[in-house]
Image: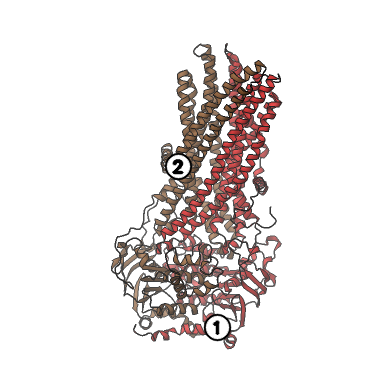
Amino acid sequence: MSPVPTAPATEDVTRPAEGAWRTVVRGVSLSPELRVGLPGTLVLALFATAGRAIVPVVIQQTLDHGITADGVNLDLVMRIVALAGLAVLLTALASGWMNYRLAAVVETALSNLRVRAFRHIHDLSMLHQAAQQRGSLVSRVTSDVDEISRFMQWGGLHLITATGQLTVATLVMFVYSWQLALVVLLTFVPFVAAARWFQRRLTRAYLTVRENVGRLLGAIAEAVVGAQVVRAYGVEARTQARLDEAIERHRSSAVRAGRLSSVFSGTGELFGALAAAGALGVGVWLGVGGEVTPGTVVAFLFLITLFVDPVLIAAEVINEGQNAVAGWRRVLDVLDIPPDVADPGDDGVDLPDGPIGVRFEHVSFRYPAPDETARNASGPLVLRDVDVTITPQSRVAVVGETGSGKTTFAKLLTRLMDPVEGRVLLAEVPIDRVRFASLRRRVVMVPQDGALFDGSIADNVRMGHPDITPEDLELAFIELGLADWVQELPDHLDTRAGERGSALSAGERQLVALARAYVANPDLLVLDEATSAVDPATEVRLQRALAGLTRGRTTVTIAHRLSTAEAADVVLVFDQGRLVQRGTHEQLVADGGVYGELHASWVRGTASEVARADRPGR
Amino acid sequence: MTVSVRPTPRDPSSRGLLRRGARVIGVALRNAKGPFTLGLSGSVLFAAATVASSLVLGWATDEVLYPLVEAGEIDAALLALALIAIVGVALFKAVGVVGRRLGAYFAQFRLQSLYRRKVTRRYLELPLSWHRRHPTGELLSNANADVESAFFVAAPLPMALGATLLVVITAVLLIVTDAFLAAIGFSVGPLLGFANWFYQRRMRHAATVAQQARADVAEVAHESFDGALVVKTMGRENEETARFRTTTEDLRDKMIVVGRLRAFFDPVIEALPNVGILLVLLVGAYRVRDGVLTPGDLVTFAYLFRLVALPIRVFGWLLGELPRAVVGWDRVQRVLTAEGRMEHGARAPQAEGAAAVTSQQVAFYHPSTAREDLSGPAAADEVLSEQHRRGVASVSFDVDPGRTVALVGATGSGKSTVAALLVRLFDPDTGEIRLDGLDLRELRRDELSRNAAIVFQEAFLFDDTVRGNITLGGEFPDEEVVAAATLARAHDFIMELPDGYDTMVGERGATLSGGQRQRIALARALVRQPRLLVLDDATSAVDPAVESEILRGLAEADLPSTVVLVAYRQSSIALADEVLFLRDGAVAARGTHEELLVDVPAYRDLVTAYEREARSGEGRGMT
């Protein structure tokens, strides 16, 4: 494991590939389930292998001794056939049973690996910062793992039996003639070197393939999620061209890997022949010298096939396995990134009861560039040295232009990300020490894009308060003044929200997200332009309801509505990542500065009905 | 958040699997003739070289090894010849293997990419209502895993084809030698057939449900990662993990069933050829005793039979892949044959300048968004009673060229639906929408997008540069891009980005703020100088000050456009020449903002809520 966290986002194919063996060792150590029942499986493998090695030998013996030019030895043939038949049966049973066991072990281990990677990805802030392509992350818990499973179900098996067969064949070869056995083994020394050469290249080639699968999924997701824009702008051709490019990239990288692997198997055939030639040559030489009989050499030539076949199979399995190893490595790489917004869990503390105050101590933040993790982010600072205290139960309005750092402030406040420098304290507890169970119950943020899940509206709201009764749920909508809206929905609260809430309008999604925060009943509520798409009358109704909710709570509202700033106890003014002004609305208006300008433009905006009257000729 | 309970996918036809499998193979062969020719040639060369190599070894034993050892003297030239012959034949064998495998890889990946193209093309063609029924994750899985499964069958195909040849040749040789013994030997054929039939019957269903489970896993992963912000803000990591675990364990169980079926089938396939050989030896021994066969013939027979043992196994592999291939193929076909696409006419608007827009008694109800599996039969858009669907009942209005009209209504009143209908994201159920007097359905493909542009509230950006997101590949000179961005008040912040217009914005524009995304999306529409511009609350995330700058800029720019805008803020509405007040799925009132303020109390209540709230002095709340 590399000491520096490897960024999975670095889709860099030029970096030296970690040895496949290392990956497998790492993988197995992370999935101890793979070792479950391994002794039993190995015993079965031994039987299966022995059977596989015995049957050809038995047949050979029958042909050599049972059937001679003089006639047949029926007794011997009967006995041998019965014996071989038994061996065939036992082999089949043993390998069947072994497969049966392996299927369960492998699938269980991989299923747990998937879940682990999934959970881990959720603990990485890059997921919602989306510095990295989500398609690529999805591929790590889907197709990358599929690839491991596919490999283990056939490859692992063949590898085990091939190894066994190889051992048996080698032993028998040495029994026949140690000199010739050495010749065969020596011939395969350069083959092993060649195999390593190919394997290194294949590792890299298949890693590229896996990465291209990730890119492909990203491209498809973009075309599907952005279907509306694609339709509306008639850019199907361009979108298809982008898709085609991703598809073609994947194809050509896969073909490249295939080419390597094909050439390699050709090499294997050649080495098989070289071994036979070597055995014949040395056999003749030894035979002339009286060391071996020609019969031994003939038997040996037959044994060589028993030796070469498993070598080729093993080499093939190892090569094809590179695809799986690449997938495995991508999963492990993601697991290697230290979780940056992880739950401190049992080591953490709960927030003390009562209202929550907030303190930012010299907090700075920068976003990671597309191929960086939060730890090594190098983007420009979007928040610089913010130092502020918010007293419990106060109502704070955060204002500033787009891109001034307001949303970043909100995200740090709710620990969607951790600061690059400085620290954030809630109720005097460093926020990264607070257990998530406590943090997410007491602190709720409503993002501007009230993202929903594909479930009913009730399901979505219930996320804020899992134990809420249906009656209370309905009551919440009534209290928020949304009863009429619910009434007009086709299935009322059971109406499906659709994927990402697509069955609802943007404003309606915000209503649901607000209702969710409302039932959650937090002590610190952070609203990030949470009602920007809602009609004014509804918004005012919501405001009244929320005013009840916010009483006795700390609220931080990112707003661009004048009334919000006016009503706040404190206004924080952000400009280019810095906190430039703070105070009450009246103080700040008197001070002028950035707030003065914002205020002036708000006033202009509200007064524009007047301006309209000036527009002539319409 | 609940895992939707779906009926077990029906198995349209458990029969005819071999026939359907044959069809998949036929499709594969047709679409990758070149690679398969290469693969087959390699296969044949390999088979020939295999036979040749056993002949060469036999010759080397009889003519080189024994004579030389008996002579007690090495004939270097003869020995060298033997060694060269062995290696030479192996060279052909190697070339054969390489050819066969290259052919298989080329074919497999060509087919995959071909069908990925076809499937994604359909994604782009199928109506949005179809998209709503199919979660992104499932479509991802379809284009990836299903296509892959369908053409895994291409891998053993060249080998199997080569094997067929080998089996036919050896079968002829065997029958000539001893027809009765040949019949005994090949009796494993029907046995193999029976085992396969049994296997396929079970496997078909197991593979279908496993493939659906695979799609479900992809779907949950995609949805959960896509909604990561909500997961984090609501502290739902544990619940999400539990949800993912449920689907993953479902896949696990189904894959175990698949694996166990193969665990049963594979050893049978492997054992049967051996059983054949043993039968041949046993019966052959009696035939030799009875004098029907010479011992030499039996030995040859046994060797030949061993030669076909491997090809028979290859068939086993091919047959083993078939169920998965057919399942994958069926799921791919369900997308390729899905009903519905937008039909286009052949006309184009002739007028220049801003467009005239008419909506005549338009009714549109969103079709059901119930989920649909790719494993089950395709569901037609369900016909639900109108009260169970959302949409608009009867919308009529017309907008003269060059006018700016505001669509105003409560949240959920159908404004966005009307906006979407104006650019034909959907077709009305009844009534029609006309652009310059032409029904939108009569317009040539691409003609509407050339004339009209919509800006959605949720700005969707592609993983591309800022410039690429504005032009979307269209040929626009830099000045026009800059002019559009300036008008959208995006130019200044774009210039502050690391690479200006060439800055990559990340997937979905993740590196930008909501307001910045909206302004780029607006520039995207403006650079096209659309004759009809539809703004669906397109500046909701922009600061009010900037928003009013934008809207005033638009008014002053004298665009050659008719503008329909969905808005709430009085300052925005006030910029419109006219207001359409939407209520109960119809246009309830129409007039200037001032007129409606006076005449329509509901309208007044809606748009002046802030001011009244401010006046009442109770508005001590939040945004």
Q: Residues within 10 Å of mark 1 (few under 14, many from 20)?
A: some
- Residue A68: name its quadrant: top right
Numbered badge on residue A210: none
The percent coordinates of residue B146 (x first, y second) are 48, 47
User: Relative to residue A301, is residue B607 depicted above or below?
Assistant: below
Residue under label 1, please give it. Answer: A566
Q: Nearer the viewer, mark 2 or mark 1?
A: 2
Host chain of mark 1: A
Query: In the picture provided, is B526 more to the left or to the right than B88?
Result: left
- Residue extending furthest toward the front: B77
User: Which colour scheme appears in the figure?
Assistant: by chain
**Which residue occupies the foreground of this view, B255 or A374?**
A374
Q: Could you say which is closer to the camera, residue A121 or residue B34?
A: B34
Per the model, the C-alpha gap separating discs 2 and 1 is 66 Å
Question: Residue A126's image quarter?
Answer: bottom right
Residue A552, image quadrant: bottom right
The chain that appears red in the image is A
Marks 2,1: beta carbons within 8 A: no
The C terminus of chain A: image quadrant: bottom left
Identified at 54% across, 54% down, the residue is: A214
What kind of residue is marked 1?
Glu
Q: Is residue A313 left or right of residue B603?
A: right
Image coordinates of residue B234 in percent, x first then y, are 58, 65
Shown colour of chain B? brown
- Residue B345 at what x, y percent from top left? 30, 60
The image's mark for residue B326 is 2
Does residue A395 sit above or below B82 in this rendering? below
Mark 1, secondary structure of its residue: helix
Asked if residue B460 can be seen in this view, the reply is no
Q: Amino acid at mark 2?
A: Val
- Report the label total: 2
